[in-house]
Amino acid sequence: MIPLQIRKIIFEKFNDTNLRFTNDEIFEVLKSNGLDSAVTIDDVEQYFNQLRDGGLIRQIAQNFTTNYYKLFDVVEKMKCNSCSQEVYLGKMESRVCPNSACKASI
């Protein structure tokens, strides 16, 4: 569920290829949206790595645990007909639902 929340935050707050953003900024939004207080920034690193490896974001710098990112392309909001969830995909990403329980073609 966290990867879907990160995608939504990127869509709502950083959906511009000229903007840079950090994992810390997104983590703060996750916490303000009710993320379990036991979850740390290190726990969500794997999700940023997935987004990077999947081609949504690119890492442009790093300072200790803070990673700076930019989008490869703008993010689009879509609805998956299989799981009925709103999903957020970069224009260059495969049209596959990012919901781990679904993975249907969009």
Image (spheres, grey):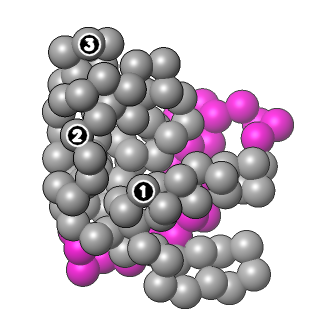
Q: Nearer the viewer, residue 3 or 12?
A: 3
Q: Position of residue 64 (x, y in %)?
A: 75, 81
Q: Amino acid at mark 1?
A: Gly
Magenta span includes 84: no
Measured from the top left, where is residue 85 in percent x and y? 30, 19
Q: Is residue 92 left or right of residue 28?
A: left
For the C terminus, the image quarter is: top left
Badge 1 marks a residue whose secondary structure is loop
Q: Of helix, strand and loop, which one carries label 2?
A: loop
Left or right of 69 on screen, residue 37: right
Amino acid residing under circle 3: Ser
Question: Which numbered tag is attached to residue 36?
Answer: none
Q: Which comes before the other along the chain, label 1 or label 3?
A: 1
Read off the residue under disc 1.
54
What residue is drawn where x is 39% and y is 35%? 98
- Indicate which disc residue 82 carries: 3
Cα separation, mark 1 vs mark 3, equals 21 Å
Residue named by callout 2: 95
Query: Residue 10's spot in the image, x, y percent?
Result: 36, 54
Residue placed most toward the observer, 62 or 95: 95
Marked residue nearer the N-terminal end (1 or 2): 1
105 with respect to 49 (left or right)? left
> Is there CB contact under 8 Å for labels 1 and 3?
no
